[in-house]
């Protein structure tokens, strides 16, 4: 059985995220102030063969021209997608309603972790993502992501 068939058994909605997504990320402090904002270009791939069931390519661009790129390969095990990359480790799983939940522990922020929810739009062309950031167990910011599928 290939990676896609295995993923479809445990996270069938996840496969609907395949493709290119563009949007904006806004990082918000606890008072609701935007502390950072940048555009995003996200590519989601599901290789059928090889060690990775999912690979995400991120390109973030700030208004001042700064660019950050990351490649995030994930493996499928125990009914979830797992990552262990330079900046974080953790997993994603799917609810029976088709929401994708993530818990990621940051390696680049002492005591840092975030919980993410990915909500697909009913049109298949949009999705919303929210991150809840904690450090040493205390909430300190949220990230809001609005994305559209690029055709």
Image (cartoon, rainbow, N blue to C red):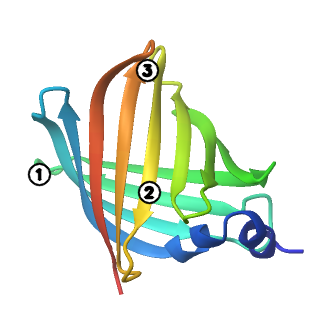
Left or right: 61 in relation to 19: left
Q: Position of residue 10 (x, y in %)?
A: 74, 63
Neighbour tally class for label 3: few under 14, some 14-19, many 20 plus, Cα within 10 Å: few
Q: Which mark is residue 118?
A: 2
- Distance between the alpha carbons at the discs numbered 1 and 3: 24 Å
The quarter holding residue 104 reads: top right
Q: Do the residues bearing badges 3 and 2 touch, measured as CB atoms within 8 Å?
A: no
Counting labels gives 3
Q: According to the image, label 3 marks what residue?
A: 109
Q: Residue furthest bottom?
A: 151
In the depicted view, which residue is nearer to us: 66 or 54? Answer: 54
Secondary structure at badge 1 equals loop
Q: Give the secondary structure at mark 2.
A: strand
Q: Between marks 2 and 1, how big is the CA–CA gap?
A: 25 Å
For marks 3 and 2 on the same chain, the one whose residue lies earlier in the sequence: 3
Q: Nearer the viewer, residue 67 or 112?
A: 112
In the rendered view, would you say 89 is above or below 136? Answer: below
Specify the label residue 53 is tagged with. none
> On the image, numbered disc 1 is attached to which residue?
63
Mark nearest the camera among 1 and 3 is 3
What is the quadrant of residue 141 in the picture? top left
Disc 3 versus disc 2: nearer the observer? 2
């Amino acid at each position: 059985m290939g990676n896609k068939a295995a993923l479809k058994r445990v996270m069938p909605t996840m496969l609907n995220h395949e493709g290119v997504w563009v949007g904006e990320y806004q990082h918000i402090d606890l008072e609701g102030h935007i502390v950072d904002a940048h555009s995003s270009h996200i590519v989601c791939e599901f290789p059928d063969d090889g060690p990775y069931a999912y690979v995400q390519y991120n390109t973030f661009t700030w208004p001042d021209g700064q660019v950050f790129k990351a490649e995030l390969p994930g493996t499928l095990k125990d009914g979830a997608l797992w990552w262990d990359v330079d900046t974080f480790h953790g997993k994603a799983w799917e609810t029976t309603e088709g929401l994708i939940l993530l818990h990621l522990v940051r390696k680049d922020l002492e005591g840092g972790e975030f919980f993410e929810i990915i909500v697909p739009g009913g049109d298949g062309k949009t999705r919303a993502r929210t991150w809840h950031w904690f450090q040493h167990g205390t909430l300190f910011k949220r990230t809001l992501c609005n994305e559209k599928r690029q055709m």
